[in-house]
Image: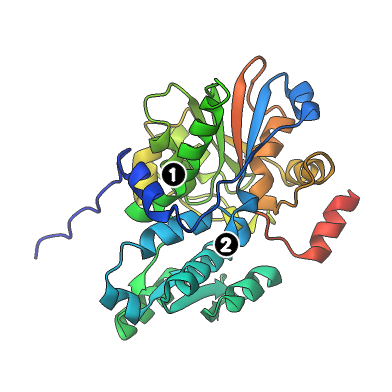
Amino acid sequence: MAPPAAPTLPTADDIPAAAERIAPYVRQTPLLTSPVLDERTGARVFLKAEALQHTRSFKYRGALSKLLTLDAEARARGVVAWSSGNHGQAVAAAGARLGVPVTVVMPQDAPAIKLRHTAYYGARIITFDRQREDREAIAFALAKAEGLTVVPSFDDRFVIAGQGTAGLEMRAQLAAQGLAADRLLVCTGGGGFMAGCALAFEGTGTRLHTVEPEGFEDHAESFRLGRQVQARQSPASDCDALLTPTPGRLTFAINQPRVASGLVVSQEEVHEAMRFAFEHLALVLEPGGAVCLAALLAGAVPVTGETVLATLSGGNVDPAPYAEILKG
């Protein structure tokens, strides 16, 4: 039997097509600025506030992009996704908007706010033990048994294209001010957000950087070694949205030749960024959504004199731990 055909990589042309597809359903999120941040970094920094997107993360873009490509029969059967929370919420919300039944496989220890919001949109939630069970295996078994379409969290042509629409917005928002980005930092778990943005910024000369929490810097290590490697997954991190152990097959193929380097931030640097966002931007960020801001505040890459874009990718955080982080 012949091996299965390699999945189709998205191209730069897929990004505007996705933008047109999802335009009636998403909001254009703002680019935020802070004089305090500019002074601390020596740069002109613009922060893409995807924490203000529907479902409070960029994931809504990719979920819509994927579901809108399904035919009527596939929509009627429904879809299944796996997620620590943000992708699950996004697929559930997109399904509710489009009339598509949704099942989400989520870890038992996912933040309560993410479980609650996913259920709010009417999704069927199946929990698993992330230490002993394989979420993808559970999802694919359900897909086979029930005829569901799998909606991957990052390694999918249409999901990647949907995430890249945020990149197109950033470019247009800067261009409207007569500016172009010297550098772009993107919060990175499986690499879909960066892959979409890398395609959206194709040919611009903007230097691209993934940003990951310490212990889960699989992209930084994979770029350094020139091959996909697994994160050491230690020390523990509360950046639950970014704890994918290895880069995706599609996302790594897109990102490796385009990303300048991978940046890594500590948990304390992430918490400091969350406090900064609250105090200076009036914005609630979850830990995984704050890593790019953390990298800038920590000086993880030299940006003096540059125009810099960075993503604030999510704002779904439980109140109690958030309050503790704000106390410092």
Q: Is residue 108 left or right of residue 262?
A: right
Residue found farthest to the bottom: 145
Q: Residue at x 60, y 21 (%)?
A: 307
Disc 2 to disc 1, C-alpha distance: 17 Å
Q: Secondary structure at mark 2?
A: helix
Mark 1 burial class by Cα count in 10 Å: few <14, some 14-19, many 20+: many
Find residue 279 and report its horizontal and vertical position in percent.
84, 42
Mark 2 burial class by Cα count in 10 Å: few <14, some 14-19, many 20+: many
Q: Is residue 173 left or right of residue 299?
A: left
Residue 37 sits in quarter: top right
| Disc 2: which residue | 86
- Tell me if residue 132 can be seen: no
Q: Is residue 245 left or right of residue 44?
A: left
Q: Amino acid at mark 1?
A: Gly
Identify the mark at residue 164; answer none if there is no mark.
1
Q: Residue at x 52, y 69 (%)?
A: 93
Q: Amino acid at mark 2?
A: Asn
Residue found farthest to the top: 305
Q: Nearer the viewer, residue 282 or 207?
A: 282
The quarter of the image holding the N terminus is bottom left
Q: Is residue 299 left or right of residue 246?
A: right
Find residue 44 and report its horizontal and vertical position in percent.
67, 22
Q: Nearer the viewer, residue 302 or 229?
A: 302
Find residue 129 and report its horizontal and vertical position in percent.
57, 76
